[in-house]
Each structure stands twice: as C-alpha cells, then as structure tokens.
C-alpha cells in the first residue's frame, strides 16, 4: 500500500473515511448530535478512522488536520437539518 504524499489525495482519503463513518453510523450520529455528545458516542469509530488515515499519509499531511476537518464537515455540518443544541 502506497503512502499518500499529495495534499489533495490526503483530503480525499480523509473525506472517504469520514463518509464511510457517516454512512454506516447514521443512527449513532443522530443520537450523538441530539444528546450533544457526538464525540463520546462515536469515539471508537472516529479513532479507528484516524488510525487508518494516519497509516496511509505522510506525517506532514497528517499534521494538516484533513481528517478532523472531514469529520466536522461530514458528521456535523452535513447534519445541520437535525435539531440539536449545537445550532
């Protein structure tokens, strides 16, 4: 398996991992948003994705927080229509 050393490819990988988390954990995400404890509810899944992302990109790209941004975009911002305490 090749290590990603291109910022755009790293961004796509982070979004793909976050997208899978969103797809396969919709119910937990909604529960976490409504109870204002998303990161507690999804901790194991988010950290598993982080470990995968870290193993696939250079240290320099990992430090750019592409994964954290993808988590916010796909697990939080995309659920803006859900009634919760965040907004």
Image (cartoon, rainbow, N blue to C red):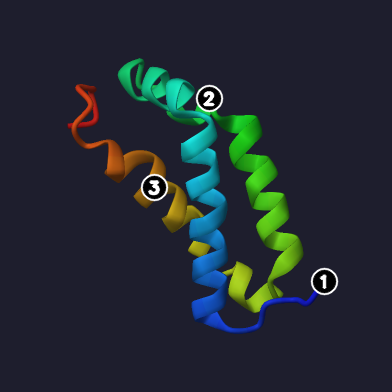
In the rendered image, which quarter is residue 37 located in? top left
Which secondary structure, mark 1? Answer: loop
Kindly tell me whether residue 44 is visible in this rendering: yes
In the rendered image, which quarter is residue 24 located in? top right
Q: Residue furthest front?
A: 23
Is 20 placed above or below 39 here? below
Which secondary structure, mark 2? Answer: helix
Q: Residue at x 48, y 38 (%)?
A: 23
Q: Residue at x 59, y 31 (%)?
A: 43
**x, y (%) of residue 8?**
49, 79
Residue at the spot of label 2: 40
Residue at the spot of label 1: 1
Position of the N terminus, as image quadrant, is bottom right
Position of the C terminus, as image quadrant, is top left
Is 42 placed above or below 65 here? above
Q: Which mark is residue 65?
A: none
Instruction: Using a 10 Å C-alpha cutoff, classify the residue at mark 2 as few (fewer than 14 neighbours), some (14 to 19) or many (20 or more).
Output: few
Residue at the spot of label 3: 74
Kindly tell me whether residue 65 is visible in this rendering: no
Q: Residue at x 55, y 76 (%)?
A: 9
| Foreground label between 3 and 1 | 1
Q: Are marks 2 and 1 in contact (CB under 8 Å)?
A: no
State which tag comes first along the sequence, 2 or 3. Answer: 2
In the rendered image, which quarter is residue 3 located in? bottom right
């Amino acid at each position: 398996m090749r290590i990603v050393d291109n910022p755009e490819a790293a961004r796509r990988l982070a979004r793909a991992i976050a997208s899978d988390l969103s797809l396969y954990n919709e119910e937990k995400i909604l529960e976490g948003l409504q109870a204002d404890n998303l990161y507690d509810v999804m901790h194991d899944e988010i950290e598993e994705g982080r470990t995968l992302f870290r193993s696939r990109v250079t240290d320099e790209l990992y430090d750019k927080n592409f994964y954290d941004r993808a988590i916010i975009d796909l697990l939080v911002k995309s659920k803006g229509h859900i009634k919760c305490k965040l907004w």
